[in-house]
Amino acid sequence: MTIYYGMAQWQHPAWVNWLYPASLAAGERISRYSQVFSTVEVGSTFYTKVDDAQLLRWYNSVGEGFKFSFKAPQTVTHRLLERPWLDVQRDWLAFMLSLQPFQAKLGPTMLQFPALCDERALDTILALCDMWTLSTPLSVEVRNLVYFDKAQTESSFLAELSVRNVNRVVMDSRPVFSTEAYCESLVEAQKKKPRVPCHPVATANHPVVRFIGHPELPRNDVWLDQWAAKLSQWLSAGLVPSVFVHSSDNIAAPTLAARLDEKIQVLMPDYQSPLPLPQSQEQVSLW
């Protein structure tokens, strides 16, 4: 029974003297991060092409059990509707080719589509899925509300992903929209994060969860309880989830991940936690 826990980044100023000592060079923090977490979202590939040498440095910095979840380029996803299909295909094939040497440490690659991609984009989304040639999992995140209608469009979408063994990314942004934006981090999160229903459906063997936590940590417990129950069900069914935990400023994201894992341990006594999160900054200072 394995859950891959990760963040949306592997370094944060607030994590110094907690997840890694201040003396550790920035370029070495991914190695220390990988000793605590087993996966990470890599958003840089969404914005620009990451050269092969950089990918190799990341690959060599982590252990064998670690998994990178790269986001597909925006030229494939967010510009899907405005670009010629042949150009989109070219960029998608080039991206897959760049990942091919690193398959041993790949988690679910993410195709993340904007709200502009409605039901008319479904055939094109599925065509991109059909082009996937790597042996590692593929996942799809959609943000148009038609894909959450609990009716024909969503049913068709889920069925088509299932046939292709492609995972749906389950976005849970309920916590950051549960209160008014009374601080800068919540204002920013509510601007940037999609406000979509949370439908925790697994369409393949490696479901992906993106949890966006509230900065008031106790407020998250109601949703963490729900996720502990759902993840326990998935583990019992033999699925291997990836859980990427964010918070409005990402400072407390590691704490939220540890809290979720504790809740799963309560529900599943035989479950062995894969999350050795340091308990205090004092502990880290002794390294």
Image (cartoon, rainbow, N blue to C red):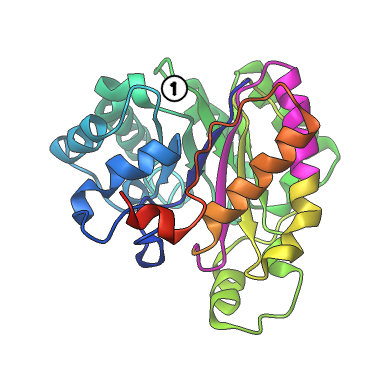
Q: Residues within 10 Å of mark 1 (few under 14, many from 20)?
A: few
Residue tagged 1: 131
Coordinates of residue 3 in the picture (x, y in percent): 58, 30
Which is nearer the eye, 223 or 154?
223
Instruction: Name which residue type carries label 1.
Output: Met
Instruction: Classify residue 83 as left or right of residue 267.
Output: left
Instruction: Classify residue 113 as left or right of residue 89.
Output: right
Whether residue 179 is visible, yes or no, is yes
Q: Is residue 236 magenta?
A: yes
Q: In the figure, residue 119 lies in which quadrant? A: top right
Which is nearer the eye, 108 or 35?
35
What range of the chain is rendered magenta?
A: 226-250
Which is nearer the eye, 91 or 243?
243
Image point 68% across, 41% down: which residue? 262
Image point 38% across, 53% down: which residue? 284
Which is nearer the eye, 106 or 109?
106
